[in-house]
Amino acid sequence: MLKLNGIQKTFNRGTINEKRALNGVDLHLNPGDFVTIIGGNGAGKSTTLNAVAGVWPIDSGEIIIDGVNVTHLSEHKRAKYLGRIFQDPMNGTAATMEIQENLAIAARRGQRRTLKWGITRKEKAEYYELLKTLDLGLENRMTTKVGLLSGGQRQALTLLMASIKKPKILLLDEHTAALDPKTAAKVLELTERLIKENNLTAMMVTHNMKDAIAYGNRLIMMHEGRIIFDVSGEEKKQLTVEGLIKKFSQASGEEFASDRALLS
């Protein structure tokens, strides 16, 4: 479903602030893979997601989504293949529009725009049933402005919007980092359920090593723009935080030194 072949990216090339962010990243995802990505600050986690999304051009390498080479496609042309959720609950939705209007925008992504009636009765019924699956009572608040929702409700709605068209790849960039622990746990459970029910292929960046171990069928660890550890299946299920830190030291030759990850 996704192939990253030899991805290279350097920022501020030729200046004193030159930074090699991705250093030959090779990663192949099968359909239905749910991959968690862990690593210290500046390891290349979010940069990898941005490369897939086409936020900026890569220096060299190939990005292939479901057999289509998207390496040179712009971000907006690549968007039809992707769903994305950001760390900030304020991103990904239109705060001044109603819940049902936000869902309509997501459901019609990639379709031709016409002057037909805004939201049909049939669509409202569909959105009601979709919102009901969240178990947050939002199905009874469909005309509420999204800006009035809590951070957790908003991220749950964004998950629904990102998965409604069943994207080829779902990109989750620390999407629970701004939430309190209880809300974050609920959003993560919802994330896993939506990925399984829709058979989505997903990449989730996280600083929380327990979450990286608990969720998904595969875990990769990055360091200095490279993938240094890739584990899946039973081996992943047997991992512990202590074991993960040890694997990092063995693979990188350094001590794991990410305060955010260790404190999580």
Image: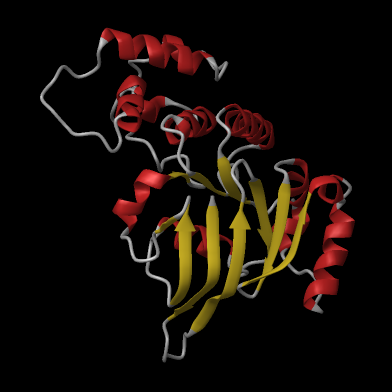
Q: Is residue 169 above or below residue 102?
A: below
Compared across the picture, whether 171 is left or right of 250 comes to left
Residue sitting farthest toward the left: 115
Residue nearer the viewer, 102 or 28:
28
Q: Which residue appears at 31% of the width and 25% of the height? A: 104
Q: Residue, x 63% and y 31% (percent of image)? A: 196
Q: Position of residue 209 (x, y in %)?
A: 75, 52
**Where residue 200 appears, x then y in whole percent?**
56, 37
Figure colour scheme: secondary structure
Q: Is residue 81 left or right of residue 6?
A: left
Which residue lies most toward the front here? 67
Q: Looking at the picture, how far across and down is residue 241, in whole percent?
A: 84, 53
Q: In the rendered image of this protein, does residue 246 appear above or below residue 19?
A: above
Observer-nearest of 99 and 32: 32
Specify the quadrant of the image occupied by residue 249: bottom right
Is residue 178 visible to us here? no
Residue 198 sits in quarter: top right
